[in-house]
Image (spheres, helix red, strand yellow):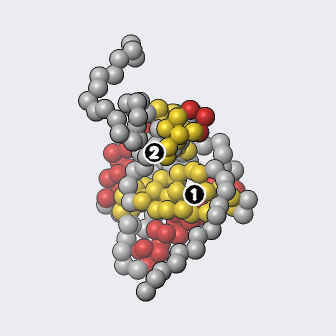
């Protein structure tokens, strides 16, 4: 019984790619990048995300095309197995010297990335989600995205993500 897990050590920036999915089709959103470290300068303990920005300039057009194809392949594979995925598929990628490597999939909007990506959506979000729920995503015109950037910053109590006070008022943001 003992199990040994051997993992590849990868180096490079991480990006997040979210996609609207209707069980067959998948429409990727602009790539985002979050910041995991609690303190400035990429220092401190790891967190669930202290902020994000989109679109990420870290990924080239060729790398983005590869990552988007990986997302489409996952949706196709699930559909072929009789388990169509409907919702938001979140792909976490590392941009290595050998190209994008998939780190993880999540079946949800990613936080805080979603807070930076969705404000860029110019298409009607309700119509996109309804098309996902009814299997008509491919029938929509291509999604429209603002030619802009967006960012979000998390405000956290001192000590986060370890032991920290909860319920404190936020002041000084007037």
Residue positioned 48% across, 80% down in the render: 3
Of residues 81 and 49, the one drawn nearer to the viewer in this rendering: 49
Q: How many marks?
A: 2
- Marked residue nearer the N-terminal end (2 or 1): 2
In this picture, residue 36 sits left or right of residue 87: right
Q: Which residue is mark 2?
A: 47
Residue positioned 46% across, 62% down in the render: 105
Helix, strand or loop status at disc 1: strand
Q: Quadrant of the C terminus?
A: top left
Q: Which residue is mark 1?
A: 93
Of residues 87 and 152, the one drawn nearer to the viewer in this rendering: 152
Helix, strand or loop status at disc 2: loop
Residue positioned 52% across, 78% down in the render: 4
Image coordinates for residue 75, horizontal then vertical, percent: 46, 68
Relative height, residue 44 to residue 11 (above, below): above
Label 2 environment density (alpha carbons within 10 Å; few <14, some 14–19, many ≥20)? some
């Amino acid at each position: 019984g003992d199990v040994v897990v051997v993992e590849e050590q990868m180096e490079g920036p991480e990006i997040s790619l979210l996609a609207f999915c209707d069980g067959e089709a998948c429409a990727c959103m602009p790539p985002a990048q979050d910041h995991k470290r609690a303190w400035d300068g990429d220092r401190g303990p790891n967190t669930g995300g202290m902020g994000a920005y989109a679109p990420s300039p870290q990924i080239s057009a060729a790398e983005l095309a590869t990552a988007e194809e990986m997302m489409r392949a996952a949706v196709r594979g699930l559909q072929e197995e009789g388990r169509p995925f409907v919702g938001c598929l979140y792909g976490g990628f590392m941009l290595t010297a050998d190209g994008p490597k998939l780190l993880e999939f999540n079946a949800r909007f990613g936080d805080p990335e979603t807070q930076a990506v969705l404000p860029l959506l110019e298409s009607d979000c309700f119509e996109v989600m309804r098309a996902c729920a009814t299997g008509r995503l491919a029938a929509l015109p291509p999604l429209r995205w603002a030619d802009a950037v967006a960012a979000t910053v998390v405000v956290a109590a001192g000590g986060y993500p370890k032991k920290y006070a909860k319920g404190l008022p936020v002041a000084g943001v007037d």
